Structure formats: structure tokens, C-alpha cells
Image (spheres, coloured by chain):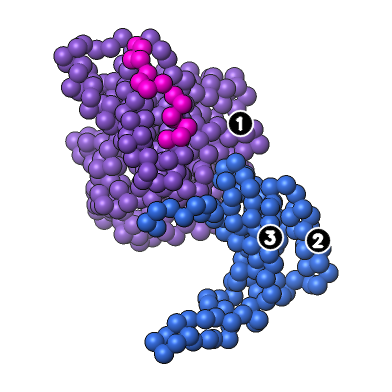
Chain colours: A purple, B blue
Amino acid sequence: MLEQVFRDEWGRILASLVGFLGDIELAEDAAQEAFATAAERWPRDGLPANPAGWLIRAARNRAVDRIRRERTLAAKTEQLGRELRDQPEEEAMDETSTFPDERLELIFTCCHPALALEVQVGLTLRALGGLSTEEIARAFLVPFETMSKRLTRAKHKIRDAGIPFAVPPDHLLPERLDAVLAVVYLIFNEGWGDGRVDLSAEAIRLGRSVVELMPDEAEAHALLALMLINHARTAARFRGSELVLLDDQDRSLWDRRQIAEGRELLERALALRGTGPYLIQAAIADLHLSEPRDWEEIALLYERLEHITRSPVVTMNRAIAIAELEGPEAGLALLDRLELADYRYYHSTRADLLRRLGRAEDARTAYTRALELTHPGPEHRFLERRLADLS
Amino acid sequence: MRYALLIYDDIEVRDRTPAEERRRITAAVLEVLERPPVTGWLRLQDIESATTVRREQRGPLLTDGPFVDSKDFLGGFIVVEAENLDGALAVAEELQELRPWGAIEVRPVREEPSIGA
């Protein structure tokens, strides 16, 4: 019961407390204390009518008490104490009162470009997703101490450097929203951390929040569509622990509900006159679900994406479509113009085209290079099988 | 909040820039410094004029030149009054737009010495 409230409401509760207290660290402590109090009282007194409101109220009261107690400790806290002194001693636990949703402000704080990208990611998972520092550390394969220090430093920087807790003004919004969406998509692509923390599902939850909070942003809809359409194929992507390519996947394992929702969001993004990179990627992901695939349309969309992103990875993906349309030779010609020597999928893509052209020796070299760049796991085993099949 | 903008210059790039162009840049920068968010600024003489003081066991040790020996050097300070970091970053970005070299480090000012620090 409490756990469900925690999953659903942590971000909203924390955001409201950051808005009130002006400090993420204080807010986090207060929220945690409030949840501890709830764990004690709710089983005894029953679930309050407005659990989030109850928790915010309880956390506020605890924080105000604590600030009063520790008033002399630091100048900044003292100032806050002065501001709070004028407030009534103890706010009534009014169960019906609601608090404004300030999650959007918190997302923009966590994804502020003055913070390093890895910090933005960790902070967003902690503050909005409610993941523990330990879970985040494990998901990103870094020691707990490292992640803990990283997050603490970030919270201090937000406070000391005056990183705003606000939705950016119009002239900054497009660029800042891009940063938020990039963080969400990066979390999605980290995928299945250690099997316990499902980062893809976490990213989808975050994506849903962004859509809910910014219902007029086409790219927010498009990103959620992209994530849902890709996530829908999760169950079919592995047989046992072995990777299954799209063409060989059991389509009955695809999550129809997620695909339908993804398509609806895609429609909405189009209706909002979106033309951004996530919209194009979502459209491509959608095209990949049809059988036979419309490679001409896919190649065209990749070309549009190339114009926006100027990314060689996008060109590489267009080369795959070109190979389907005009043959492996044409795809290979496009690949050979790219500088992606350290990118594992570049070598595996090249290897596949070389294999199809019957150039076994060149394919072997490319598979070997791809294997060197791939961590042990399903993808590694897949490439090993391909390499063994060559002889 | 107050922020210090530390203006770093790149000697090599700057010295390659024609004098006429440099004068034009300086004029544009001075125009930005006239505006309200800027509450004060200092331009420093070139690093050739710097003297660095260290404390050795036998007493102070003076060296001719800057503390950090690099092609990048601190060319000046600007103090900006802004509501939050975004306000300070906006001034820094505007200035950096005018200068084809160097970088600007934005640092919040420590307003009151806190106890125990």
C-alpha cells in the first residue's frame, strides 16, 4: 500500500517540498521522514483520503520543526528559519487540501545543462523516479560511494550555484526541453540494469510524466511513442538468453497494448505539427513493425533525420535501408564514407553486408572488430555465432 | 544572487586576431558591461606583468609570471547580479558570442562567511 504510494507519488511529493524548502537535500530528508511516519501510522489509523497531501503536510511540518531546532547552524538555514517563523506553529493535517504539481520545475532543475549528463541522469532517477542511490549505482555499474558522492555534489551545486527551480522562459524552453528528453531517452537505452531495476520501464514512467505535464509538446509525445513501440518488442527480443533479430521474432509476443498506445501518441505528435528527431524516430520504429517493411519510406525518414542530427549513426542506419533497396553493395558504399571506427554496430553492420556479398574474409575481420567492442552477453554470443557460420 | 564571471583568454588565438578586430570586440564587450545585470568589472594587464608570491620555509618566494603557466589566462572579472544561474549564464553566453577565443567560468559569489568554513 505504502510502497504503491511511494512509486506513484514520490516525485510529486519531493517536488512540492523542494518548492517549499528551496533545497533538494532538505526536501529529500523531510520526505523520507514523512514516509517513515506513514509506515508507522497508516497500518494503525488507515490510509488517509489524500495520501500525497498527508505526506507533503507531514514532511513540511517535520522540516519546519527541524529548521527551527537547527536555526543557528548555518546562515542560509537561519534565513529560511526567519521566513518560516511567520507561519502558523503547526499546520492542520487537512486531508482534502491539494498542492500544486511542481514536478515539471524539478525535472528542469535535474536536467539543467550546468550539470554533467551522468549527473542529470542519476538525479532525475532519484528525484522523479524515486530510485534509491543504491539502485541507481547498480544500474549504471558504478560503486555506491561514487554514485552517492555524485548525487550529493549535484544537490550542493544546485543550491550553491542557484540553478533555478522553474520551468524555463520561452526563449530557453526548446533547448532545455531537448535536454530533458535526452536524459529520459538515455535512461531508456540503458535498458535492463541488473535485472532488478528496469530502467526502460522507469524511462517510460518519466516520459509519461513529461507528456502529462507538457501536453502541447510534440516531441514529448513522440519520445514516449518511440519508447513504447520499442519496448513492446522486449519479450520477443530474446529466446532464452539469445538475441532474436526483428525478422525472426515471434510477433505474438509483441505487446499489442503498448504498440497501440505508441501509435496513438505518434498521431498526437503529428497533430501537434511535430517535425523533430523523436517524431521521425518513432515513425521509423513504427514502420519497422510492418511486414513487409517499407524500406523506401524508412530510408527517406533516415535522410530527414540526417539533416537534423548530422549524426553518422543515422547515416549508418540509412545505409541499412539502402542495402535493402539497392543491394548490399550500395549500402556498403555509403558505410565506407563514415568515420565510426569505435562503434560496434558500425562493424557488425558492415560485417553483415560483407557476408551477404560473399566476401567471407572481409566479413570475418569486421565481425572480429565488432566482437572486440562488445561486452560479453547476448549480443556478443550472437556475433560469435555469425562469425562461426562464415566458415 | 551575485556571480563572478572569470574571463579566460587564449593568448595564441588572441594574438592572431588583427588589432582592428580586437578593438571592435572590446567595444562590443564594453557595451554589454554597461547594462544592468553587470554590477562591476576589472580588466587585468597581460600575464607578462604578473608576479606570484609563495611561502617557502625561509620566507616568501617571488616568481616572475603567473601562478598557472598555460596559454589560457585570466583576463578579467565581471560581477553580475542575477535571480539565478540562468541570468548569469545569459550574460556569459552573450559575451562569449562576441569573443572568438577563450572561455568564461561562471562562479557563484560566497555571500557570507559561514560558521566553521
For the point 40% across and 38% down, the residue is: A24
- What is the number of the mark on residue A1? none
Comes first in the chain, label 3 or label 2: 2
Looking at the picture, does residue B95 appear above or below residue A227?
below
Q: Which chain carries label 3?
A: B
A180, A280: nearer the viewer: A180
Q: Mark 1 points at which residue?
A: A275
- Residue indicated by mark 2: B27
The quarter of the picture where residue A103 lies is: top left
Indicate the position of residue A29 as horizontal and vertical percent values: 31, 36
| Label 1 crowd (10 A; few <14 / some 14-19 / many >=20) | some
Q: Which residue is drawn at the image coordinates 43% and 29% (left, top)?
A: A85
Segment colored magenta: A81-95
Q: Which residue lies furthest to the right in this view?
A: B20
**In the drawing, does residue A83 fall left or right of residue A136?**
right
Identified at 57% across, 43% down, the residue is B84
Answer few, some or many: residues within 10 Å of disc 3's Cα (few below 14, many 20 plus, some between 14 and 19): some
Q: Type of residue at label 1?
A: Thr
Chain letter of the residue beneath label 1 in the structure image: A
Specify the principal SS of the magenta part. loop
Q: Mark 3 points at which residue?
A: B41
> Is residue A88 in the magenta section?
yes
Q: Is residue B115 magenta?
A: no
Q: Which of B13 and A16 is in front in this view?
A: A16
Which residue type carries mark 2?
Answer: Ala
* A268 vs A63, nearest the viewer: A63
SS of the residue at dot 3?
strand
- The image quarter in which residue A226 lies: top left
Residue B63 image position (x, y, % from top left)? 54, 86
The alpha-carbon separation of the residues under discs 1 and 2 comes to: 41 Å
Residues marked 1 and 2, same chain: no
The reply to whether label 1 and label 3 mark residues of one chain is no
